[in-house]
Image: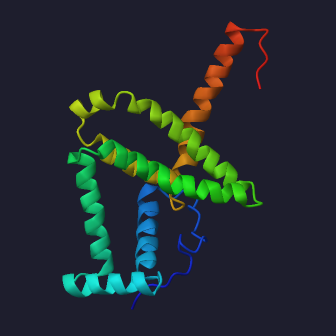
Amino acid sequence: TKPTQAGSVREGTAPAAVAGAGPVDGAKSANEDFVRFLYAPHGPQADAIISTIETKTKLKREQIGYAVGGAIGLLLIFGSIAQLLCNLIGFAYPAYVSVKAIRSPSKDDDTKWLTYWTVFGFMCTIDFFADSIMKIFPVFFLFKAVFLMYLYLPQTNGAEYCYTKYVDPAVTKFDAWFAKQFPGAKQE
């Protein structure tokens, strides 16, 4: 039996991360949503193309999806466009849903994506050292891409965790240092 689309990311009603659930639980949930998405209808033309690929390769949709993910992973390790591909992974979907969040009347989704972009900004400072890191750790862009997906996937809410655990305390320490160095300066 094919999974249904109910509760999938495509529908816009993805389940929020369960409090106390770890990254493994989030990955399992993301995989279940991925499989639901693959079997959901995507229009007659797309469905026909996918069915043809399934028939010719004799592979299930999720196997094809995993193969595409594996190819992307190899490009992130060995490809000359690894940095560009990694940044597209961290930018394309979050930018799209950020625009949708801005258009919506709710401010909760605005806060969620502002949190993501704040953590993303902190992560971008590491890119300055990417060439040096790649010499020591050649799978840097693969790990960065996986980490960026961990940050934005609704099943993990990693950006909220990283913001609370690392970014906010760092900014708080900076504020205290700044206030000590410049006692008369106004802080917002």
Numbered circles on residues, count: 0
Image: 43 above or below 168: below
State the residue lying farthest toward the bottom: 1
Q: Quadrant of the C terminus?
A: top right
- 171 versus 100 height, above or below: above
Left or right: 6 as drawn, with respect to 62: right
Position in image of residue 57 (x %, y %)? 20, 81
Which residue occupies 57% across, 46% down? 116
Q: Is residue 43 above or below residue 135?
A: below
Q: Quadrant of residue 129?
A: top left
* Residue found at x 42% / y 62%: 27
Q: Nearer the viewer, residue 99 or 111?
A: 99
Query: How are the residues colored?
Result: rainbow
**Residue for point 46% across, 61% down:** 26
Residue 109 appears at what percent x and percent y? 67, 56
Is 76 placed left or right of 153 in the picture?
Answer: left
Residue 106 locus on image (x, y percent): 75, 59
- Residue occupying image coordinates x 32% and y 86%: 51
Looking at the rendered image, the quarter that the N terminus falls into is bottom left
Q: Nearer the viewer, residue 101 or 15?
A: 101
Q: Quadrant of residue 28?
A: bottom left
Q: Position of residue 73 (x, y in %)?
A: 27, 55
* Residue 135 left/right relative to 180: left
